[in-house]
Amino acid sequence: MTAFLLTCVLLASDATAQQDFEVDVLVSRGETGPGLSKVDTYTRIPISKLSFINTVNGFSAGYDVKLDVTQLSEEGRIRNLVESKIWQSKMSVDTYAGTQMDAEFDVTTQTFEINPGRYIFEYSVTDDNSKQTYYREYDVFVRDLSGPVAISDITLLESFDDQNFTIVPKVGGRVQSNEKGFQVFYEIYADDGRDVVITQQVERTRSDDATGARADELVYSKEEIATLEKGRTQYLVTMPVAELEVGTYRLSVDVESLDGRPVASVSRRVDVAWSGLYDHIEDIDQAIAQLEYIAKKRDLNFIKSAPNSVERQQRFNQFWDRRDPTPGTTRNERMEEYYYRIASANRQYSASILDGWKTDRGFVLVRFGEPDHVQHKPYSFGYEPYEVWVYERIGRQFIFVDETGFGDYQLLVPVWDERTKLY
């Protein structure tokens, strides 16, 4: 079987969450010595985070990446430094506008082999021109893949080239909610040829309460009998899961013997982010009315009082242009997020009388996004059904009570009330 090569490129992304840089660490079976695991580590930095200087060849930037890998004991104590690497990346763009693109990223990669175990990966990225340094630290468990059957880590793909046999990973592990599916790459290693059952699954992971109790919702599963070759078998797979809701998912691959005995398994987290805006806006007048939760009354009246539909559209666009976190780009991430939340509220909470975004739960969802935890309390003697939405990231919780018993959950106290504070 032809081997695919991992590669890195300057790439565009739809990710809305901006960080100084992001990292992925992917483990596969080592090739230079018995018992070793190969580590591919990727860094991705937004172009707009870099400092460019004007040169005769355009605008130029560069940065250094330093990685220190420190081994930990089974008790979590620091043992010794096992790897220290420094590498560079340089780039140039033709125009100043090209230096401000938040949706453009530079990706670098390094590969090395180490013994299985627990490690601290410490990254620092230093801008050549500004000398600004960004830091990230990760607790990484490098799995032992030397068993008779083992599976590499799952690589979520940005793209692949079947002509040159190269793949580009999605650093950060995010897909968009309007994607028609996503592609993954993994390898299965076997000491001898054998027939097995391979199961691929995608589950949405939810926390039902503040204690972290988890309830998984299966959204995709495929089981097939396969013949493993001795050595390394590569899989390039499309997961045909379309229109996923925003949230966290677990992608898993399990290998069993034909009689059902577990042989090997691996899983990884996949985050689904907001997709393109116009999938969630059906009508401009409706979209204007839905500004109620974000626009001041005078702004809303100004847009609605436009003398004609063309002017109304222009005023609507101007309202969102002033709130665009990435002016100069083709996308307005804040606008997209807002209307995705509207659409999500309509899907989840629409009743016979009210659209979902007009309900109390819809209002909180649009204002604050998906809660970190939800406690569901069904009807019991002396108590109406209620839900508690916990937002640890803002230190708030909101309680909704279904006094009628027909799913019409009402907010117990207003969102601004001090009693909504967690602490």
Image (cartoon, helix red, strand yellow):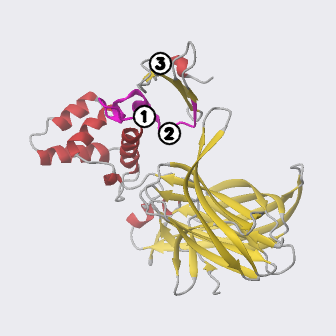
Report the residue at 46% width, 23% height from top: 415
Report the residue at 57% width, 76% height from top: 167
Residue 368 within the segment the image draws in magenta: yes
**Secondary element type, mark 2:** loop
Report the residue at 60% width, 33% height from top: 392
* CA gap, disc 2 and disc 3: 18 Å
Q: Amino acid at mark 2?
A: Glu
* Among the 4 quarters of the image, the one containing residue 144: bottom right
Image coordinates of residue 393 in percent, x first then y, are 58, 36
Q: Is residue 14 left or right of residue 236?
A: left
**Residue designated by label 1:** 367
**Secondary element type, mark 3:** loop
Q: Earlier in the sequence, mark 2 or mark 3?
A: 2
**Residue designated by label 3:** 412
Foreground: 193 or 416?
193
Q: Is residue 171 left or right of residue 34?
A: left
**Secondary element type, mark 1:** helix
- Judged by depth in the image, the label closer to the viewer, 2 or 1, is 2
Q: Is residue 313 left or right of residue 214?
A: left
Asked if residue 72 is positioned above or below residue 422 in the image, the reply reads: below
Q: Amino acid at mark 3?
A: Leu
Q: Amino acid at mark 1?
A: Arg
Rendered-image quadrant of the N terminus: bottom right
Give the magenta-colored segment's residue range: 349-375
* Residue 21 visible here: no
- Dot 1: within a 10 Å radius of its alpha carbon, few (fewer than 14), some, or many (20 or more) residues? some
Rendered-image quadrant of the C terminus: top right
Image coordinates of residue 46 in percent, x first then y, are 52, 61
Q: Residue furthest left?
A: 307
- Dot 2: within a 10 Å radius of its alpha carbon, few (fewer than 14), some, or many (20 or more) residues? some
**Residue designated by label 2:** 370
